[in-house]
């Protein structure tokens, strides 16, 4: 079974600063996908960024980038130039390439606070 | 407009009631999901439908009954729920089983 661990229940960052959210995972598969989702107070889960495990290059999406360390099974999210609208719960998630019996597995989430 | 619409947004029901949650997706996706989000717990996958066929049922109690009449609609029928079933129920859809999920805003369910 696959697992996803987010060890930071809460993180705080000053507006315009950079913050990194940690995520580690475990899977027996070699081909899988990793995601970061954002859940603002509106409750809707929004895809932030996606990484294919077979790609060595770290995914980037505007101010959001990941540090994917496959050997270490680590998938951290870096948010640059933090904005007030970035305040939300952030969930790391994994799914095996074939879908897998467990589907998409989520971590418990990290609550990100942006201080003005 | 999120592309995935859930109704109602909030629901309060007694343990003897029967109610249904509705999810509709306008994205042309082939897979739909029900997730349960409880406080301080990871999202729990409840049901997965691919091309209107159930492909996953993660040992969910029978008091939760899903229905997928077509690729755009997904229901979760509820009956004789327990207070511990109070949670946010999120519907999602994706193009394929391993594609990124698009979520609705969820239904906040309170069982009294």
Image (cartoon, coloured by chain):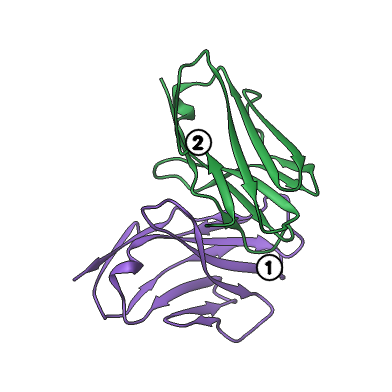
Query: Residue at 53% across / 16% down in the picture?
Result: B17
- In the rendered image, is residue A4 in sight? yes
Q: Residue furthest top?
A: B16
Q: Position of residue B82 (x, y in %)?
A: 49, 21
Query: Residue at 59% across / 68% down in the picture?
Result: A34
Q: Position of residue B91 (x, y in %)?
A: 58, 46
Q: Which chain is purple?
A: A
Count the numbered circles shown. Answer: 2
Query: Residue at 66% across / 33% down in the picture?
Result: B59
Locate residue A81 relative to residue B49 in the image: left or right: left
- Asked which secondary structure carries label 1, the reply is strand
Q: Label 1 to label 2, Cα distance in Å?
A: 34 Å
Query: Residue at 41% across / 77% down in the picture?
Result: A78
Q: Quadrant of residue A104?
A: bottom right
Which circle marks residue B8 in the picture?
Answer: 2
In this rendering, the answer to whether A110 lies above or below B81 is below
Which circle marks residue A32 in the picture?
Answer: 1
Q: Chain under label 2?
A: B
Q: Colour of chain B?
A: green
């Amino acid at each position: 079974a696959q697992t996803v661990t987010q060890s930071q229940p809460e993180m705080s960052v000053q507006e315009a600063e950079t913050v990194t959210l940690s995520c580690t995972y475990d899977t027996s598969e070699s081909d899988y996908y990793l995601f970061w989702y954002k859940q603002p107070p509106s409750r809707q889960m929004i895809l932030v960024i996606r990484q294919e495990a077979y790609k060595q290059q770290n995914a980037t999406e505007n101010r959001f980038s990941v540090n994917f360390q496959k050997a270490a099974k680590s998938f951290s999210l870096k948010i640059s130039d933090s904005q007030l609208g970035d305040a939300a719960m952030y969930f790391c998630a994994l799914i095996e390439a074939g879908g897998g019996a467990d589907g998409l597995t989520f971590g418990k989430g990290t609550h990100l606070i942006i201080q003005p | 407009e999120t592309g995935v619409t859930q109704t109602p947004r909030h629901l309060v029901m007694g343990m003897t009631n029967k109610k249904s949650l509705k999810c509709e997706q306008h994205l042309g996706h082939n897979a739909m999901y029900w997730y349960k989000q409880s406080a301080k717990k990871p999202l729990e996958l409840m049901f997965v439908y691919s091309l209107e066929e159930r492909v996953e049922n993660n040992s969910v109690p029978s008091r939760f009954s899903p229905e997928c009449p077509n690729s755009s609609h997904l229901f979760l029928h509820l009956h004789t729920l327990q207070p511990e079933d109070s949670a946010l129920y999120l519907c999602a859809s994706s193009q394929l089983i391993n594609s990124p999920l698009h979520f609705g805003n969820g239904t906040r369910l309170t069982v009294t």
